[in-house]
Image: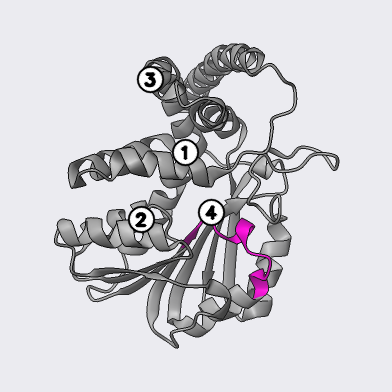
């Protein structure tokens, strides 16, 4: 048995080493193509609007888009893993809040698991909320509603069994107030699930003299103890936190997300080359994503945090 374990571990080490070598070489090539050692600030909103113009044309294209996000975004792998654990013990009539829903991909994923769940998805962007409401009406999802709202002053007392908060808290300065609002809005025993950058290189920040390459972030990342202390101080009875985007995930993120976004920000012509780029890069990213989700990490550029009322 011990011999089998060692063989398995050696195989994993070999896969990781091979993927790392190839991915690092690809990273060097892409970095040279960008012609700079410092990545410029990147605004997501213009790219989001461009993607919306493409994938909002039909419900089918929107579903394809959600499928691509689930494949490409490592955080989606981690979030889905935690949600599957919650689903095992969930109520058939659960009430869910998707806080900062964005494109609505997590709302869609949850709505497909149980049409009896009631899901409220909130975002600050009017256009995005309207797009999502139109899509979910087109597919007949009567259990889903999108609303424009500000999480710093939002409460629905004792209403929700689950609150999902993915890539949101790094955008909100008044984070403790939002945590208090979550507690007030959750039923006893309800769970809050957060995915956010850490202070270990989250937002692609690796030193005091660097800042996030995503301009909309108000903080570069949370210290793992800091966010747990804030949640407990806000009133949560139990908090767990772990790192995501360890060594495999950091390479996968650069290959599958950062460099394509940077190049799309420089020229929309890269949309034409994007399928060919992913044809080469994604198989490597897929293996690295699997390794990141399957393993545990002493450090990482992202955090998965769960808190219970």
Q: Closer to the camera, 88 or 59?
A: 59
What residue is shown with label 2? Answer: 104
What residue is shown with label 4? Answer: 167
Camera-near label (1 vs 2) is: 2
| Type of colouring | one colour
Identify the residue at the far left of this view. 140
Magenta residues span 165-176
Asked if disc 1 and disc 3 are in contact, CB closer than 8 Å, the reply is no
The residues bearing labels 3 and 4 have C-alpha atoms spaced at a distance of 28 Å
Camera-near label (1 vs 3) is: 3
* Residue located at (41% from left, 34% from top): 72
What residue is shown with label 1? Answer: 294
Q: Closer to the camera, 50 or 300?
A: 50
The residues bearing labels 4 and 1 have C-alpha atoms spaced at a distance of 21 Å
Camera-near label (4 vs 1) is: 4
Give SS at disc 3: helix
Asked if disc 4 and disc 2 are in contact, CB closer than 8 Å, the reply is no
Identify the residue at the far right of this view. 209
Instruction: Please determine whether, in this image, residue 143 is positioned above or below residue 42.
Output: below
First in sequence: mark 3 vs mark 2:
2
Give SS at disc 2: loop
Give SS at disc 1: helix
* Residue located at (34% from left, 42% from top): 53
Where in the figure is residue 93, as x and y percent of width and height?
24, 76
Dividing the picture into quarters, in which one does residue 128 lie?
bottom left
The residues bearing labels 3 and 2 have C-alpha atoms spaced at a distance of 25 Å
Residue 11 located left or right of residue 110: right
């Amino acid at each position: 048995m011990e011999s089998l374990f060692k063989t398995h571990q050696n195989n994993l080490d070999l896969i990781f080493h091979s993927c790392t070598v190839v991915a690092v070489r690809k990273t060097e090539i892409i970095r040279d193509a960008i012609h700079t050692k410092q990545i410029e600030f990147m605004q997501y909103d213009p790219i989001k609007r461009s993607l919306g113009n493409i994938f909002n044309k039909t419900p089918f294209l929107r579903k394809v888009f959600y499928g691509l996000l689930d494949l490409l975004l490592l955080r989606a792998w981690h979030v889905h893993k935690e949600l599957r654990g919650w689903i095992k013990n969930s109520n058939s009539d659960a009430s869910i809040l998707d806080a900062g829903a964005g494109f609505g991909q997590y709302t869609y994923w949850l709505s497909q698991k149980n049409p009896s769940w009631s899901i409220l998805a909130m975002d600050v962007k009017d256009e995005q909320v309207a797009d999502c409401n139109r899509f979910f009406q087109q597919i007949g999802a009567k259990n889903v509603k999108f609303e424009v709202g500000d999480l710093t002053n939002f409460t629905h007392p004792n209403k929700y069994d689950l609150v999902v908060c993915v890539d949101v808290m790094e955008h909100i300065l008044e984070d403790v107030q939002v945590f208090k609002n979550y507690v007030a809005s959750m039923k006893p025993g309800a769970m809050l699930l957060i995915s956010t950058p850490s202070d270990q290189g989250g937002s692609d920040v690796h030193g005091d003299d660097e800042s996030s390459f995503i301009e909309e972030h108000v903080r570069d990342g949370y210290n793992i103890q800091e966010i747990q202390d804030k949640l407990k101080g806000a009133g949560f009875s139990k908090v767990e936190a772990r790192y995501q985007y360890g060594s495999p995930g950091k390479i996968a993120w650069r290959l599958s997300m950062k460099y394509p976004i940077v190049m799309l920000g420089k020229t929309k012509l890269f949309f034409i080359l994007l399928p060919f780029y992913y044809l080469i890069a994604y198989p490597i990213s897929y293996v690295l994503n699997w390794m990141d989700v399957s393993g545990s990490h002493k450090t990482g550029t992202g955090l998965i945090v769960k808190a219970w009322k």
